[in-house]
Image: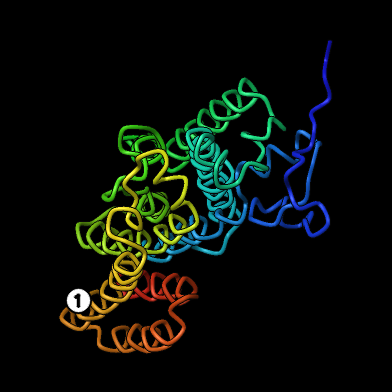
Amino acid sequence: MLVKPQAPDKAPAASGSSFNQLLGIKGAAQETNKWKIRLQLTKPVTWPPLIWGIVCGAAASGNFHWNLEDVAKSIVCMIMSGPCLTGYTQTINDWYDREIDAINEPYRPIPSGAISENEVITQIWVLLLAGLGLAGLLDVWAGHDFPTIFWLAVGGSLLSYIYSAPPLKHNTFDDCPLSTPKWAGQALFGTLTPDIIVLTLLYSIAGLGIAIVNDFKSVEGDRAMGLQSLPVAFGPETAKWICVGAIDITQISVAGYLLGAGKPYYALALLALIVPQIVFQASAQPFLILGLLVTALATSH
């Protein structure tokens, strides 16, 4: 007999927001619609930075043109990076977080039983295969002899799995595939070069600083499960300064690189972003992603 899924009874129904539920963020309303729950697991709120990486990669290539074909390529690449592969990453992360969430956030879809284990596993595979399929299509569309975008997607997906699954999950030295969307955008319209790879990896360190912020909300569950996230390993105060350093030192380092490369105006633009970034440290992400675009434009000229 088919049993209708029950909304988690521990969620704050009175204050829950349907908008938050669709974005996959805290304060979500209770929901029984399976498609809305599936969307919640993919956390659409996390898609924009990865999609922005595609934009920056296309800008850095210097070969993007505002015509129908290039715009269509970009949209397909954004779907691959955002809904498909970021959705895969968020779903598999929630799957391996289910025991921790049962302690920290028992009303979330998986620990509450709002969606079955088989349905979650099916979603993980569908999103992964769809993302890899689109990556292969983009390589054919771009006329690549070597399937660069496909292997970037494979590498990024593997890093997502390593980030999410034991034994490295929530390890102090976790990383996540923040570089791959920019590389994919660059490869789609141009050629990956060593300076692009190095600069993007630097921004991945900054992105890691932002990602670590998520570990602060899971300290109780991480400690109970014996997981060495930064706040657990070093304490919240030290972890806070590690986050700040990863974000700010990266931008300063890239500005120094651009200055040394003979691009002082781009370096000054980056430094102009660093000042408000430090002042509004708790909301550093907008300044960081604008810095990524400035760097992309610098490398395209």
Give the total of numbered labels: 1
Name the residue rendered at 55%, 55% in the picture: 46
Q: Going by the image, does 277 lie left or right of 78?
A: left
Q: Is residue 141 above or below residue 214?
A: above
Q: Spot the residue most to the top.
A: 1
Q: Position of residue 216 (x, y in %)?
A: 44, 59
Which quadrant of the view contains residue 215?
A: bottom left
Q: Residues within 10 Å of mark 1 (few under 14, many from 20)?
A: some
Which quadrant of the view contains residue 130?
A: top right
Q: Nearer the viewer, residue 176 or 59?
A: 176
Name the residue rendered at 76%, 57% in the picture: 19
Q: Spot the residue most to the left.
A: 260
- Quadrant of image for the N terminus: top right
Q: Position of residue 197 (x, y in %)?
A: 25, 56
Scheme by which the image is coloured: rainbow
Name the residue rendered at 41%, 72% in the picture: 288
Q: Is residue 158 above or below residue 18?
A: above
Name the residue rendered at 33%, 59% in the picture: 204
Q: Is residue 15 above or below residue 102?
A: below
Q: Nearer the viewer, residue 197 or 41?
A: 41
Q: Position of residue 174 (x, y in %)?
A: 31, 47
Q: Is residue 137 above or below residue 287?
A: above
Which quadrant of the view contains residue 200?
A: bottom left
Q: Disc 1 designates what residue? A: 257
Amino acid on which the number 1 mark rests in the picture: Tyr
Q: Nearer the viewer, residue 16 or 19?
A: 16
Q: Going by the image, does 219 lie left or right of 298?
A: right
- Quadrant of image for the C terminus: bottom left
Q: Helix, strand or loop at disc 1?
A: helix
Q: Position of residue 155 (x, y in %)?
A: 33, 38
